[in-house]
Image (spheres, rainbow, N blue to C red):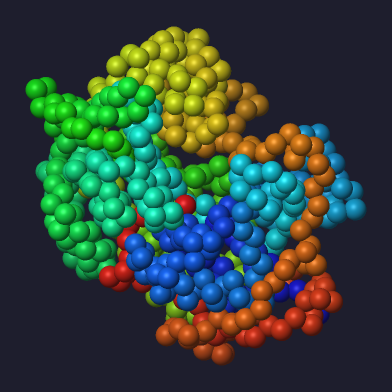
Amino acid sequence: MTAARHVAVVGAGPAGLAAAHAALAAGARVTLIDSAEQPGGQYHRTLPEAYAAERPGELQHGWSAFERRRRQVLAHPRCTWLPETSVWALERPDQDGEGTERPGRLQERPDQARKRSVGAPPRLHLLCGGPVDGSGRTRRTLDADALVLATGAHDRVLPFPGWQLPGVYSAGAAQALAKGERVVVGDRVVVAGSGPFLLPVAASLLEAGSRVREVLEAGTPGTVARGWSGRPWELASQLGKAAELKDCAAALARHRVPYRLGRAVVEARGAGRVEEIVTARLRPDWSVVPGTERTVTVDALCVGHGFSPQLELPVAAGCALRGEQPGRGGTGEFVAVDDEQRTSVPCVFAAGEITGIAGAPAACAEGAVAGWTAAGGAPSVQPLRVLRRSRDQGRAFARRLARAHPVGAGWPGWLRLDTVVCRCEETDYRALCEAFTSAAESAPRVAKLGTRAGLGPCQARICGPTVTELRDRFAGRAADGPAERPADGLPAATPHRRPIAQPIRLGELASPAAALIDDEQHLPEGEQLGDASDQIPSDSKQRPSASDQTRTEDEQTRSRGEPTHIEGEQSHPDSEQESDS
């Protein structure tokens, strides 16, 4: 008997959990991987089990649906859940299809090498058994028949004088502390930046006990109104988001928190930590209107100017990207996928915020489509058509969101020469200006080595898009201008290229990597997939294509109950526009 198709899912946020759920429904074996202790990502960040919370769904939206799906996935006998596990590298198959050694290849024990066809997805190199900064982690490798990447996104924060001071948080970090720890970042807080995500962040802080002094949206009233008012009939499918934003606005109103359009934080001040901020009115291009500066006393500042997708693993896998960096007139780069969420790499699928910032309902729909297709499910079942429609509506919402809340071209006017741009390496704006105005030093790799911007612990995750945008502005490249020609023998420079995707200790790197085998996978027992309104007719179910591995004796005796449906999250009043990282 041949084994069921094996699907590896990286990321257990809304998209990843939906992908695992759908792949199990299609009959696949699933390995679900996440660096956190519990599934949910940023959207459903939960309290640690040690808290023994009586109401874990407090500050959450869509909690009952998430909790039902989480139980069904983690309790399924064909699902292996790997919490606190980091994917630190991806290894593409050899071009000749052999498992032999070659120069520069990651080392593995000879008895664990296996042949992988050119059409196989990359091998995953894992660090298991502890948090990213923990010790005692073990190296493992994992080979699967299909790979679903759902790594989410993180906050983008534009630099301004004083943003490196303690007490200045990204909006997502502040919300994560409120939702995942019930910790407030301060008593007098200002939330600033751009996009509807500011509203649920402020609401979470208020519910956790902070006093939010004001919420500042950098977009001007005209820009925001034009972005949201065009083609209003398309918003009919997003009534859930409207209801959620209405609830957030009601929370602000109850606490008498002002919401100001066309205003931004342009400076933070303080002795040792943030004590006051300077806000100013902005023009549509985000340049400061002189004479409109105002000082506000705070003990914490939460800032977010949209999201940056976490693309290091898709780039390492060789996936093609679409879009342009903001400095070249675009709204950012994302993974290019087809109608079935396939990337340009065989057997690699992508879902969620790495394909476009569209919110949790769209991420769930994308994840379900990706998981079902990766598992070899029948392509014509009715639930898939519903999910694709929800996915497409989410993508239309993402385009509307980008139009309503674009990053203005005038924000570099906030910077002074001594403004820190790379907080890890304390690289200031002066150093970047000097590098970018020199023909010999402006090339991306030369500028990185010369200024050290992007060489710190975050590996350019925070400053990378900003440095790229500033360099393109100095070079005068427009969206339709010529792209930079990469050096011979090197891939094109990008802030997302990180061959080592997560921190790894030298001792961990030196230790041999053991393959993750079924005997080591402690599978939970319990309920099976079920309880959904969208049923797959029995005559449309399709067993997945056989892999080239035989089922182990252990698997043959494992109880498998047959799942009966795939499920995706539709837009409803409990949905929210957030990152699923």
Identify the residue at image location x=35%, y=28%. Answer: 273
Q: Position of residue 434 (x, y in %)?
A: 41, 10
Relative depth, front residue between 150 and 344: 150
Identify the residue at image location x=53%, y=63%. Answer: 49
Q: Is residue 508 left or right of residue 442?
A: right
Q: Is residue 152 left or right of residue 515?
A: left
Query: Seen from this angle, which residue lies furthest left?
Result: 291
Q: Count how many numbered circles sit on residues in the image.
A: 0
Which image quarter: residue 534?
A: bottom left
Q: Position of residue 94 (x, y in %)?
A: 76, 46
Which image quarter: residue 547?
A: bottom right
Q: Is residue 400 visible?
A: no
Query: Seen from this angle, which residue lies furthest right?
Result: 111
Q: Is residue 44 visible?
A: yes
Q: Position of residue 179 (x, y in %)?
A: 39, 56
> Which quadrant does the N terminus fall into?
bottom right
Q: Is residue 456 above or below residue 370?
A: above
Q: Is residue 84 left or right of residue 442?
A: right
Identify the residue at image location x=61%, y=62%. Answer: 32
Identify the residue at image location x=57%, y=58%. Answer: 37
Q: Is residue 272 left or right of residue 240?
A: right
Relative depth, front residue between 226 and 106: 106
Q: Position of residue 343 (x, y in %)?
A: 54, 54
